[in-house]
Image (tube, rainbow, N blue to C red):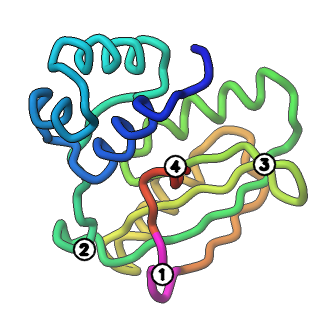
Amino acid sequence: MNALDTLDTAILKTLQSEGRISNAALAERVGLSASACSRRLDILEKSGVIKGYHARLSHKALDYRMIAIVHISLSGQFAKTLAEFEAAVKRCPNVLVCYLMSGEYDYILRIAARDLEDYERIHRDWLSALPHVVKINSSFALREIIDRPNVGLA
């Protein structure tokens, strides 16, 4: 996709704050006809700028009161080792985010748990069972300061 113009940016800003807005209301908000707005949305979706539409759930309201940041070291960084680890970690339902990293650790995970006992279960049943893991270092978030679902648009 080519660079975003001001109309595309206006559409994206509006959707970030009001994901359930109707196409007609979105079109009116950004100054387009409904059909032109729909065409632009289709292009933004097909080009991958818009990855999807989601309900943003509260972990706390769902009784997941603990967030763990987990650093993982593997036995090596061979393509097969990474692929096997990544396939296995995707199956763990409590892993919210997983990043392949440069630096001291190979991966960083953000994990939701109900409490310390639940995290112990996740650690025992899931994390320790992941292939090629040689070191797990867990830290627990004391308080969430920022959790942005999207980057800011100029």
- Please name the amino acid that badge 4 sits on: Leu
How far across and down, in percent of the image, does residue 84 sit? Answer: 66, 27
Q: CA distance from mark 2 to mark 3?
A: 28 Å
Asked whether disc 3 touches disc 1, contact meaning CB atoms under 8 Å apart, the reply is no
Q: Nearer the viewer, residue 150 or 68?
A: 150
- Tell which circle, 2 or 3, labels the residue nearer the N-terminal end: 2
Q: Decide: is 48 above or below 90.
A: above
Look at mark 1 in the image and give the residue it sits on. 145
Asked whether disc 4 touches disc 2, contact meaning CB atoms under 8 Å apart, the reply is no
Q: Secondary structure at mark 4?
A: loop
Mark 3 or 1: the one toward you: 1
Residue at 42%, 54% (x, y): give it. 149
Q: CA distance from mark 3 to mark 1?
A: 23 Å
- Please name the amino acid that badge 2 sits on: Lys
- Please name the amino acid that badge 3 sits on: Met
Residue 108, quarter of picture: bottom right
Look at mark 3 in the image and give the residue it sits on. 101
Q: CA distance from mark 4 to mark 2?
A: 28 Å
Look at mark 2 in the image and give the residue it sits on. 60
Looking at the rendering, the stretch of residues picked out in magenta corresponds to 141-146
